[in-house]
Amino acid sequence: MNFNRRDFVKIGGITVAGTVLLPPFLQSCTGVTLSKDSENYLNHFEVTPELLNELIRAAMEKGADYADLYFQHSINNYSTLEDGKVNQAYSNIGFGVGIRVLKGDQTGFAFSENVTPEAMLKAARTAANIANSTGKNVSVNIEELSAPNYYPVKTSWENTSIKEKIPFLQKVNDKIFAADKRVSKVNATIGDSTSYILFYNSEGRLAWDYRPMVYMYITSIMEQNGHVENFGVSRSARQGSEFLTDQLVDTLSKEVVEKNALLFDAGKPRAGEMEVVMSAGESGILLHEAIGHAFEADFNRKKTSIFSDKMGKKVAENFVTIVDDGTMQSDRGSLNFDDEGNPTEKTTLVGNGILTSYLHDRISANYYKVKPTGNGRRQDFRRVPIPRMRCTRMENGPHKKEEIIASVKKGIYVDNFSNGQVNIGAGDFTFFVKSGYLIENGKLTKPIKDINIIGNGPQALADIVMAGDDTLLSGSTWTCGKDGQSVPVTMGLPTVKIKKLTVGGTNA
């Protein structure tokens, strides 16, 4: 059975990667053997193998080394509750193709939101202008990428109506108001998206993917004696509407009320340098911002990362192992293959304290003479892929959480962050801590809030003197920005102790 674009959207998920184990094979009109699912994706974007190769030839007609095509059809939906009612709902659709041409480490790129042959050929020839020599004859055999499916979908978002989402938003509102009389306002949003991806390159690699995404974000606002505090929590995953459950509603409602209420009793510590204990899970932002970006290979290839001369060298204690993993089941940062058609993997960046790998896309992998790590990512078909993180986490260490806290005479324990900034070149960072606790004589005492912690990424990595055996992934809705592009990511950390960071607080 073949599907046109309209029917393909209606069936939503019939061709997700997880359904393809031993697919039936069809013979295309040119004699190229393709699976039924590849045929469906070609039909969805209304292209043929002949047209794909014609576009590649046009992109390389001025002597390029390589070219690829990235087709994308994205469907995004948002539903928001405010003032006790779901009063906002909207959708948007993105559809088009990005055409990239490489000549050495130079990139030519063009995109088209019109996928007629004429429009795509014009875009291909625009991208081809990066090169200026005589093109070579391009003739390749199409080879389908057989990728695992890390995000199977039970019920697609295309088959889930807004009427099915509204009760979950209403339950969140009602549970939070019922939990604490100080609650004055609740905002809640469910955002879901589906992306159909078709990829083809000048090496003949053909790949397709069905990428789901969903998040729920809740903000609680409380008032006590004229004092107002707010707190937000979220969860996100690559799942269908099976993501929405009463258990999720219960968990998030309880979490946001408890953490919001705690802020009324929180203060600020005395400013200065001190030991800092990072909680398991959410503190993974330290890895992502202060360290992870500096491991992205484009910064190292250009010698702007402070880690550019540290490959194979000791950068942390022996118990520190850091990985970037694109293979986590239903994880927000996972990919069946990256946006350059390369399979994703679990990449060890730091193994037992030694820097062992950067995060590579095609350009950096060619430069370093290594295989791509599956980290070439783009926001959408209108952008070029660049090295990006997926799920970045530190593996378990040898210590217990209680042991780590007990070792601190005077310091802070931080467990929630709202944002962070890092200078890639110098490695200096600043994070805004939403909540945490003082540590006094080995015990958690007074709650703290709204402080900055300041440090240097490589130094902070070297200063991790204890790491717990409780690695936890943050399930929150993290989105990473770089070079004007945003992509979904996750992060994780065990409880760790950093022997010295600068803490912003009071001078009293």
Image: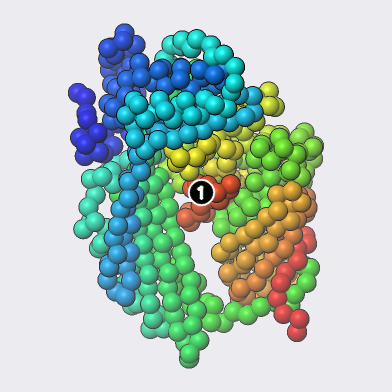
Describe residue 203's horizontal placement relative to residue 171 as left or right.
Answer: right
**SS under mark 1:** strand
Which residue is under mark 1? 486
Which residue is rendered at x = 43% and y = 52% of the image?
236
- On screen, residue 40 versus residue 361, left or right, reads left
Residue occupying image coordinates x 25% and y 63%: 167
Query: Would you say residue 199 is visible in this rendering?
Result: no
Point out residue 350 in the picture as x, y percentages from the top left corner. 69, 39
How many numbered circles are shown?
A: 1
| Image quadrant containing the C terminus | bottom right
Asked if residue 150 lies left or right of residue 161, the reply is: right
Q: Name the image quarter holding the N terminus.
A: top left
* Image vertical order of residue 7 relative to residue 235, above or below: above
Q: How is the image coloured?
A: rainbow
Q: Residue at x 21, y 58 (%)?
A: 163
- Give x and y (percent) for residue 481: 55, 51
Q: Position of residue 400 (x, y in %)?
A: 66, 56
**Residue 74, quarter of the rendered image:** top left
How dense is the environment of label 1, judged by Cα within 10 Å: few (below 14), some, or many (20 and up)? some
Residue 111 appears in the picture as rendered: yes
Q: Residue 263's spot in the image, x, y percent?
A: 54, 77
Q: Where 256 falls versus 148 (above or below)?
A: below
Return the residue nearer the eye: 132 or 506: 132
Residue 90 located left or right of residue 425: left
For image coordinates 39% across by 28% down, the residue present is: 120
Corner quadrant of residue 347: top right
Amino acid type at image mark 1 = Ser
The one of 308 and 182 positioned closer to us in this rendering: 308
